[in-house]
Image (spheres, grey):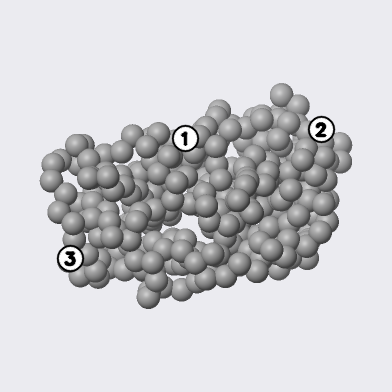
Amino acid sequence: MVVFPQDSMRSDLERLWRVCFDDSPEYVRYFFDNRYLPENCLIYLDESVRRPIAMLHLLETAVSEDGGLAPAQYLYAACTREESRRQGIMGEMIETAVKLGHSRGYKYTLTVPAEPKLFRYYQKRGFHRCFKVRMVYMSRSDLLFLCKNRIEVPGSPRDTMMKLGEVYAFRRNMLVDREGYVHWEPAAFRYAVGCHENDGGHVVTLAYNGDFGYAFCHEQDGTVTVSEFIVKEHFASALIRRILQSYPKAERFVFRLPICDTFFEKFGEKLDFAVIRRNDGKNPVYMTTLEGVRTPYFGLPLD
């Protein structure tokens, strides 16, 4: 039975999350302390023991469309206990989530499949491939060569850091006019930053002479993964230099970039990243036919 969770079920949901995903207890607790709302969570209740065996969360967002923002919901952390999988439980929950979104006035439901084979799973349930990213793999020497003709930024890193509000405003100004941009409200953006930092990541920022840029970075075993990199092309080399300074021992760098990024456009590969479904049952033709630099961008999905 698909229902909303009771307040007393929080510990069960945290346990279910940890069983299904390879996330630290601290990461899970941070979500439930800061983002979890019972009315935005669906569970499948095992009535024999009155405990959830599957769940998904619905986070409010919006998609830039035709000069405005279409309300949407992001389907997040969908999971089922292993012994209860392949019984149609998650399919039933997704259909319930879509109907709920429609009743709440959300035009779209979005989600990021956790692995490539799940794109087919969601396509069978009415979702369409829509959002792509460019994955770029570089060594430290590669990046140093790319940004050899750089803008010199005087002062210390602290002198040229951006405040969180400035990062949010810059991100919005850079992306909001692009069709298919997934927009997060300030509170959701603050959570994404806090979640990233709570998991050991760091937001590298740079502001100088009216130019800005930032990068969500996480280092593990000598490799820095940059999960969002937003900067104007002429200032990109300066931001890369700041990233290299922030991670002096890292030798490998992985960038996940919007297709509209031009600094790295000759490198990497384009990959499917997220899917979309209209909650009213119609085909989201317009959103799925945008191409090139107009390809919809889904950043900060809390993946």
Give the spatial CA distance, label 3 vs label 1: 34 Å
Q: Classify 10 Å Cα crowding around label 2: few (below 14), some (14-19), many (20 and above).
A: few
Mark 1: which amino acid?
Answer: Arg
Mark 3: which amino acid?
Answer: Asn
Residue visible at 63% across and 46% down in the picture: 69
Residue visible at 41% across and 63% down in the picture: 261
Q: Which residue is mark 2?
A: 50
Q: Classify 10 Å Cα crowding around label 3: few (below 14), some (14-19), many (20 and above).
A: few
Q: Which residue is mark 3?
A: 149
Quarter where residue 275 is shown: bottom right
Q: Nearer the viewer, mark 3 or mark 1?
A: 3
Element assignment for label 1: helix
Question: Reading the chain from its start, which is encountered first: label 3 or label 1?
Answer: 3
Question: Reading the chain from its start, which is encountered first: label 3 or label 2?
Answer: 2
Q: Classify 10 Å Cα crowding around label 1: few (below 14), some (14-19), many (20 and above).
A: some
Quarter where residue 127 is shown: bottom right
- State left or right for residue 86 relative to residue 300: right
Residue 95, above or below 261: above
Quarter where residue 141 is shown: bottom left
- State left or right for residue 108 relative to residue 151: right
Instruction: Residue 200 in the image: state x and y as whole percent.
Output: 38, 42
Mark 2: which amino acid?
Answer: Arg
Question: Reading the chain from its start, which is encountered first: label 2 or label 1?
Answer: 2
Q: Which residue is mark 1?
A: 190
Instruction: Residue 101 in the image: state x and y as whole percent.
Output: 77, 43
Element assignment for label 3: loop
Instruction: Residue 264 in the image: state x and y as whole percent.
Output: 36, 68
Q: Are marks 3 and 2 in contact (CB under 8 Å)?
A: no
Residue visible at 55% across and 29% down in the picture: 34
Task: Please tell me the numbered disc located at residue 61.
Answer: none
Q: 30 and 263: which one is in front?
A: 263
